[in-house]
Image (cartoon, rainbow, N blue to C red):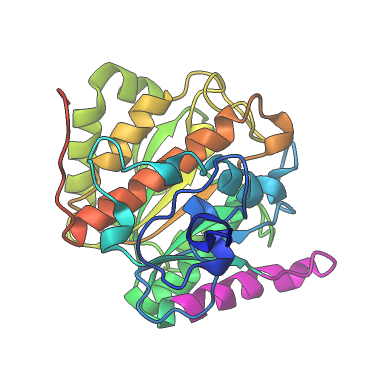
Amino acid sequence: MPVDYVNSDAAFLSDSIKGTSHEMTYGGALSFLRRKYTRDLKGTDVVVSGVPFDGAVTNRPGCRFGPRAIRGASTELASLEAFPFGIDIFETLGVVDYGDCALNPHDPSSIPEAISNHARGIIASGAKMLTFGGDHFVSYPLIRAHAEAYGPVALVQFDAHCDTWDDGGSPLNHGSMFLHAKEDQLIDVDHSIQVGLRSYNDSDHGFEILTSPWVHRNGVEAVLERIINRVGDRPAYITFDIDCLDPAFAPGTGTPVPGGLASWQALELIRGLKPLKMIGFDLVEVSPAYDHADITAMAAANIAHDWLAVMALKAGAVSKPVGNL
């Protein structure tokens, strides 16, 4: 009997970047959502790639393995239409897995420019980026490349930490890069917002801040209203640090902080971002060595999956929800 290549290792053997293949969830090549591995970006709407760098962490390392873990956790999602929308994302969106950004870990000074160059090539193709870290520092060179193409971006940051602390000019620090991005005029801070924070800084540096307690008291709809009003029609870059989630839902991260968002809140917030002019999305700080039963990686894969679903809806996919939403 001939091998059914359509339903086996589609990441390598598929002849199209559109459509969905139904493979064994426990076997096969681990591209994100079984998308085709390719660097031919013709007809591509969204490029998935990883940035496996964790040389800027201030606590527990290990999120260099995040992209691999997120890809592995995505296999079940690849086998079904997107909940709650009832759509096959890949009938509408052309999505490929580009693989990982090539880095030289023995030359830290080369890291920022390597990441920016990686992003520049993808952005130049006209595709949007869905990027998996790595630690949160990787957002800085990614934002730099996006700002070169779109102008200063409105940052929508989901995080336990502000990442705007003054580090005295340290070139590699995952707790200060958004202050540097503001100072370097990569971020339109008047249209930027931070959600889920539960760490102290004596200045908001011009960002609107919705702390985690505020989110819990006021609810998802109020948060979405504030995000949409703040960003307006500016090009929006979304960054999601998995430690925005409470450690009960995301233990596998380097700097966990109790009191965070639940998985359901995060997913509802991502699903509500459709009105924004979104130009890119990164998801960072998944550290599988501290995970339990892959729950952090699964949360990350679901968040990224739902962002792709929203992008498919923006591109014209028609939602067919079932049940009471």
Q: Give the tally of numbered discs.
A: 0
Query: Residue 297's x, y, as percent?
Result: 57, 37
Q: Residue at x 20, y 53 (%)?
A: 313
Query: Residue 7's x, y, as percent?
Result: 50, 55
Is residue 104 one of those drawn in magenta?
yes
Determine the image quadrant of residue 265: top left
Determine the image quadrant of residue 171: bottom right
Residue furthest toward the front?
1
Is residue 185 one of those drawn in magenta?
no
Above-or-below relation of 21 to 244: below
Q: Residue at x 80, y 64 (%)?
A: 105
Q: Main secondary structure of the magenta part?
A: helix
Query: Residue 298's x, y, as percent?
Result: 52, 35
Residue 151 in sight: yes
User: Nearest the camera: 34 or 274?
Assistant: 34
On the rendered structure, is 274 left or right of 3? left
On the rendered structure, is 103 left or right of 113? right
Above-or-below relation of 153 to 29: below
User: Nearest the camera: 174 or 321?
Assistant: 321
Looking at the figure, which quarter contains the C terminus?
Answer: top left
Residue furthest toward the right?
106
Residue 179 in sight: no
Query: In this picture, which residue range is highlighted in magenta?
Result: 102-122
User: Nearest the camera: 211 or 179?
Assistant: 211
Q: Residue at x 58, y 67 (%)?
A: 12
